Image (spheres, grey):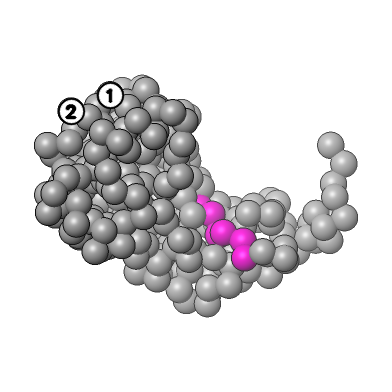
């Protein structure tokens, strides 16, 4: 496939065969994020796990200290006082059976779903819709809770969910190209720490095998694993 004019211009700035220190990689990613929009800085990990086995699943949530730079739309399944609490906390969509019907009709205008435990009977009917999109509320991730205020605030302030995909890959956005390098590094460290803390019992041998950074439209930069937690 022929390279675009932009890709040709970027190619000399990144050595595809080199493994870069984290700070140097962040600098390169920012330098190559030249689109007219504020590109997302994306982290990709190759982990030594097989997610087909339950004891090798890697899934969790992390609050990035510098936020994501993204406006996260939050939907909350709740009634009564908890619905009012969710609205006051800044939830974008709040409902119960009516929200379920909206979703069943094909409208999914949100990035995160939170539910009070008593609403899971309703939410459960949406498993085939929300599940494949990674939107199903989960007690382990803090998205099935009576403390909807905290859950909404966390989701809005830079909380990121992660889940290992086939072949042991984890992808996540850890900020925007406009962020200062120090802020991207702080988010990178927090994310890596969360990955290591969620190392499954079934993981054998080397856990973090490969790490790379890129921006939405920029080239990938491979990282030197020296000094990276869990690598």
Look at the picture and state if 27 lies above or below 165.
below
- Is residue 41 shown in magenta? yes
> Does the image show residue 149?
yes
Q: Is residue 114 left or right of residue 164?
A: left
Judged by its main secondary structure, the magenta piece is strand
Look at the picture and state if 163 lies above or below 229.
above
Q: Secondary structure at mark 2?
A: helix
Q: Secondary structure at mark 1?
A: helix
Q: Quadrant of residue 164?
A: top left
Q: Which residues are magenta?
A: 38-43
Residue 94 percent location from the top left of the image: 29, 48
Q: Residue at x 85, y 46 (%)?
A: 3
Q: CA distance from mark 1 to mark 2?
A: 7 Å
Residue 115 percent location from the top left of the image: 22, 43
Between 210 and 159, which is closer to the camera in this rendering?
159
Q: Residue at x 48, y 61 (%)?
A: 70
């Amino acid at each position: 496939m022929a390279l675009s004019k932009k890709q040709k211009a970027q190619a000399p700035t990144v050595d595809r065969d080199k493994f870069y220190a984290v700070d140097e990689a962040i600098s390169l990613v920012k330098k190559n994020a030249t689109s007219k929009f504020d590109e997302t800085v994306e982290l990709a990990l190759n982990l030594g796990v097989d997610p087909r086995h339950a004891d090798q699943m890697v899934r969790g949530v992390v609050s990035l200290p510098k936020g994501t730079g993204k406006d996260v739309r939050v939907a909350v399944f709740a009634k009564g006082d908890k619905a009012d609490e969710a609205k006051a906390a800044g939830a974008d969509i709040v409902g119960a059976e009516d929200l379920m019907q909206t979703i069943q009709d094909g409208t999914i205008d949100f990035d995160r779903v939170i539910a009070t435990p008593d609403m899971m009977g309703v939410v459960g009917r949406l498993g085939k819709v929300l599940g494949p999109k990674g939107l199903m509320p989960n007690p382990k991730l803090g998205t099935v809770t009576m403390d909807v205020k905290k859950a909404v605030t966390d989701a809005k302030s830079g909380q990121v969910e992660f889940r290992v995909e086939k072949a042991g890959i984890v992808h996540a956005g850890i900020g925007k190209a406009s962020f200062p390098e120090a802020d991207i590094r702080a988010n990178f460290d927090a994310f890596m720490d969360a990955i290591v803390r969620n190392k499954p019992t079934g993981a054998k041998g080397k856990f973090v095998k490969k790490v790379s950074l890129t921006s939405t439209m920029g080239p990938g930069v491979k990282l030197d694993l020296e000094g990276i937690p869990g690598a």
